[in-house]
Image (cartoon, grey):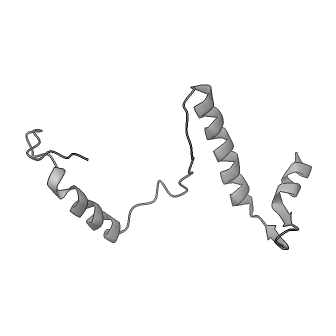
Amino acid sequence: MIKEVQQDLIEINLEQQSLIIKSPITLYFKFLHCRMAGLLSKFRIDYSDLKIIPDVNKQPSDGTKSFFDKVVTGIKKDGTGNSNNYFSL
């Protein structure tokens, strides 16, 4: 196990003549990616790309909140639960 992790920390690409030293965080996201891919395949869910979002618990910035509010202004429901505007693609 330790040998595998040490090999994953350093990546040498002879064609591009590059040396990449990966951080343990990169390895952790690689581990999460493999776990999620395994879970999706277990439930037979097909996917073409899988992105791990590292800061899902982080509060959005004020700019992001205002952008979201502008996007959903026309499709928000009123207080009664009835939608006055319909959203279609």
| Above or below, 80 relative to 51 | above
Counting labels gives: 0
- State the residue at coordinates (34%, 66%): 64
Which x, y percent locates residue 73? 17, 57
- State the residue at coordinates (11%, 42%): 83
- State the residue at coordinates (65%, 46%): 32
Q: Is residue 32 left or right of residue 9?
A: left
Q: Residue furthest top?
A: 43
- State the residue at coordinates (9%, 44%): 79
Which x, y percent locates residue 45? 54, 30
Q: Is residue 89 left or right of residue 11?
A: left
Q: Is residue 65 left or right of residue 50?
A: left
Q: Give 12 or 15, whichever is nearer the viewer.
A: 15
Q: Residue furthest bottom?
A: 17
Which x, y percent locates residue 2? 89, 50
Which quarter of the picture shows residue 9?
A: bottom right
Which quarter of the picture shows residue 1?
A: top right
Q: Is residue 23 left or right of residue 76?
A: right
Which x, y percent locates residue 33? 64, 46
Which quarter of the picture shows residue 68?
A: bottom left
